């Protein structure tokens, strides 16, 4: 500890305790995020329970290829993020920089694919509201599915966007030598956030895209 | 200092996650009725465990972190269970 006194804040005994506090803080935040998304998952569960046939039919109109590809993109980005944390533990600055950039780029790719998907939904009149058009039975329940689809993927997309800015900022700070001498906790904590956003999508994919078999 | 894993450790986890994704995706094209949902959620849960245990390093971290991670899930479960105690019994 005495070798790097500057990275341990005054209120902590040592770097170990400071790391534990940072991680605990992030996990508590993630628990509140579980409940934040949880409200939408609950609404989805209730409406799917009430209108199973309409939800299955509406789900068949989502773009399963794009949604599945996006799942792979996020899982891959999570792997790179885990490797970024490893690079920061080992103090490999250049490695860390490029892994953070690559993770952010995959996040941007995810948002691009999502945008393409939203465009298709818009053209197909699947966006709830005045322009919503449904040729099959249970139009109101189908519209409710798409309300939830846009609310859930939208809230998730906001999280991904925040994550991209976070990763790019960290890449910039890495360049400036901010995370040297075992000071990698910021990277690890940002990684926890990124993995959480990935987990949310892991549940969104089967619920929204595969509710009705094709 | 925490344990530092070799890159292979993370790539292996990535391979498992991709395999599970392929499985869920394939599941979308067959009809098992209600079991589609059950199996799909089971696979998502498995993926979540792989990410939480190995990418987020919950395996090998303190009991306090285990508790914090578990608390979020527990409250989500309570919220779903209590709501469905109402809806499913009407």
Image (cartoon, coloured by chain):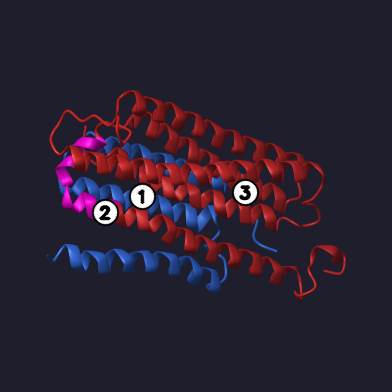
Chain colours: A red, B blue
> Would residue A206 be visible to someone looking at this image?
no
Question: Looking at the image, can residue A80 be seen?
Answer: yes
- C-alpha span from label 1 to label 2: 15 Å
**Which mark identifies residue B44?**
1
Q: Name the spot of residue A20 as percent of width and height, x first.
A: 64, 68
**Mark 1 Cα shell of 10 Å, populated few (<14), some (14-19), many (≥20):** many
Residue B52's disc is: none
Question: How many numbered circles does the render carry?
Answer: 3
State the mark number for residue A45: 2
Q: Which residue is drawn at 25% across and 39% down?
A: A143
Q: Does the magenta stretch include residue A133?
A: no
Which of the two labelled residues, at mark 3 and mark 1, occupies the earlier sequence position? 3
Q: Which mark is residue B6?
A: 3
**Residue A138, position as x, y percentages in the image:** 15, 39
**Mark 3 vs mark 2, CA separation in Å:** 40 Å
* Chain letter for the residue marked with disc 1 in the picture: B
In the rendered image, residue A18, in percent from the top left (x then y), is placed at 71, 69
Q: Residue at the spot x=48%, y=63% of the render?
A: A32
Alpha-carbon span between mark 3 and mark 1? 26 Å
Residue A134: quadrant of the picture: top left
Residue reaching furthest to the front: A130
Task: Specify few, some or many for label 3: CA neighbours under 10 Å numbering under 14, 14-19, or 20 or more.
Answer: few
The image shows residue B83, relative to residue A91, as above or below, that is below
Look at the image and tell me in which quarter the C terminus of chain B lies.
Answer: bottom left
């Amino acid at each position: 500890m005495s070798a790097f006194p500057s990275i341990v804040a005054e209120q902590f005994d040592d770097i170990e305790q400071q790391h534990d506090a940072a991680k605990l803080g992030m996990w508590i935040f993630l628990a509140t995020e579980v409940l934040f998304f949880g409200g939408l998952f609950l609404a989805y569960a209730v409406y799917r329970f009430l209108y199973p046939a309409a939800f299955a039919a509406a789900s068949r109109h989502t773009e399963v290829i794009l949604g599945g590809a996006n799942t792979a993109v996020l899982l891959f980005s999570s792997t790179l993020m885990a490797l970024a944390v490893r690079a920061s533990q080992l103090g490999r600055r250049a490695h860390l920089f490029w892994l953070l950039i690559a993770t952010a780029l995959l996040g941007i790719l995810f948002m691009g694919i999502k945008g393409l998907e939203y465009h298709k939904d818009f053209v197909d009149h699947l966006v709830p509201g005045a322009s919503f058009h449904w040729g099959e039975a249970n139009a109101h329940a189908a519209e409710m599915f798409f309300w939830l689809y846009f609310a859930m993927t939208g809230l998730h997309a906001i999280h991904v966007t925040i994550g991209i800015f976070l990763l790019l900022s960290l890449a910039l700070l890495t360049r400036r030598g901010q995370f040297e001498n075992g000071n990698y906790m910021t990277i690890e904590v940002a990684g926890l956030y990124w993995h959480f956003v990935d987990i949310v999508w892991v549940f969104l994919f089967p619920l929204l895209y595969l509710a009705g078999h094709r | 200092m925490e344990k530092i894993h070799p890159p292979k450790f993370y790539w292996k986890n990535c391979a498992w996650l991709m395999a599970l994704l392929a499985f869920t995706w394939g599941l979308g094209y067959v009809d098992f009725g209600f079991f589609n949902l059950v199996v799909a959620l089971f696979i998502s849960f498995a993926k979540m465990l792989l990410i939480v245990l190995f990418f987020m390093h919950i395996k090998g971290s303190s009991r306090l972190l285990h508790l914090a991670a578990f608390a979020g899930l527990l409250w989500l479960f309570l919220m779903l269970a209590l709501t469905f105690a109402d809806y499913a019994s009407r």
